[in-house]
Amino acid sequence: MKLIREEIEKVEVLTEGTGKSQRLYIKGPFLQAECVNRNGRMYPMSVMEKEVNRYTEQYVNKGRALGELGHPDGPTVNLDRVSHKIVSLQKEGNNFIGKAQILSTPMGKIAESLLKEGVCLGVSSRGIGSLRPCEEGYSEVGEDFMLATAADIVADPSAPDAFVQGIMEGKEWVWEGGILREKIARQTQKRINTLVDQKRLEEHKLNLFNEFLANL
C-alpha cells in the first residue's frame, strides 16, 4: 500500500467562545471525491464515504482524530507533533467539510500564532491505499484506502510536491503483526541484487582458483 497525501489550499479560521473558554478552529473541505485532483488521483465516492464513516466512528466521535503541524513522513500520528483535533466531518456534495480545534500543545501554539498573524495555512490529508492506473491517465484509489488523519496543517499546500512525494510515496507500507511497517521496494531490490552480485563474484573466484589448480 502506498502512502497518499492530498492538499487543500486554504481553510477558514473560526473563533468560538470568549475569555478563557475561547477556542480557535479551522474549517474547510478536508477531503474530496469523484474528481481528479492535481496529484492525478481520483477517490470514488464509495471508497471515500466508507472510510470517512469508519474514521468518524472510530476517531472523530471518540476524540482521537488528531493531526500534525507540517509534513509527517509516515502513516502514523506522532503525538509530539500534534497541533489540532478534528471534531467533525460532514459530507457536502463531493466534498467532506472538516472542522478542527487548535490545541494548546507546543505545535498547536505555533499554529495558533501563525493563524492569528494572518498566515494562510492549508490542510493535507494522509492515508494509505493502493492505486489503480486508468486509461484516462489518472490513478484511482482502491477499496483498501485508510485515513491516518483527515488533516495535517501545512504552510505550502499549493507548492510543487515532487520532493515530498519522492520520499514518502516511493515507499510501500504493509501490515505486519498488527503494525504498519515501512517496506522500501527499491532498497530491498538493491540489496537482493548486491547479494546476487556477491554470489557471482565468489563463484568467479572459485572458478579461477580451480583453473589455477588444474594448471599446476
Image: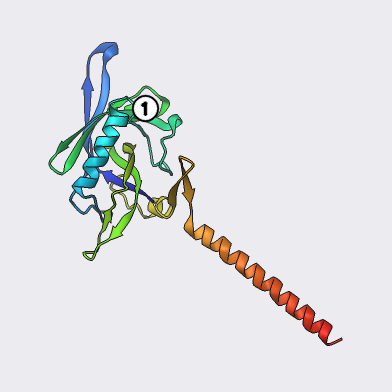
Residue furthest to the top: 19
Q: Nearer the viewer, residue 99 or 214?
A: 214
**Could you say which is closer to the camera, residue 187 or residue 10?**
187
Hey, which quadrant is residue 136 in on the image? bottom left
How many labels, in total? 1
By what rule are the colours in the image chosen? Answer: rainbow
Left or right of 178? Residue 46 is: left
In the image, residue 34 above or below residue 103: below
Residue at the image point whose x is 42% and y is 50% from the top: 168
| Farthest-out residue, front | 177
On the rendered image, what quadrant is the C terminus found in? Answer: bottom right
Q: Residue at x 42, y 32 (%)?
A: 81
Image quadrant of residue 23? top left
Coordinates of residue 208 in the picture (x, y in percent): 75, 80
Q: Farthest residue in the left direction?
A: 93
Front residue of 46 and 124? 46
Q: Residues within 10 Å of mark 1 (few under 14, many from 20)?
A: many
Going by the numbered disc 1, the residue's amino acid type is Gly
Residue 196 screen position, x and y as percent: 61, 68
- Left or right, 155 with reference to 12: right
Residue drawn where x is 29% and y is 46% of the image: 6
Find numbered disc 1 in the image and state the secondary structure of the residue it sits on: helix
Is any part of residue 51 visible from this angle? Answer: yes
Residue 138: x and y in percent read 25, 60
The residue indicated by pointer 1 is 108
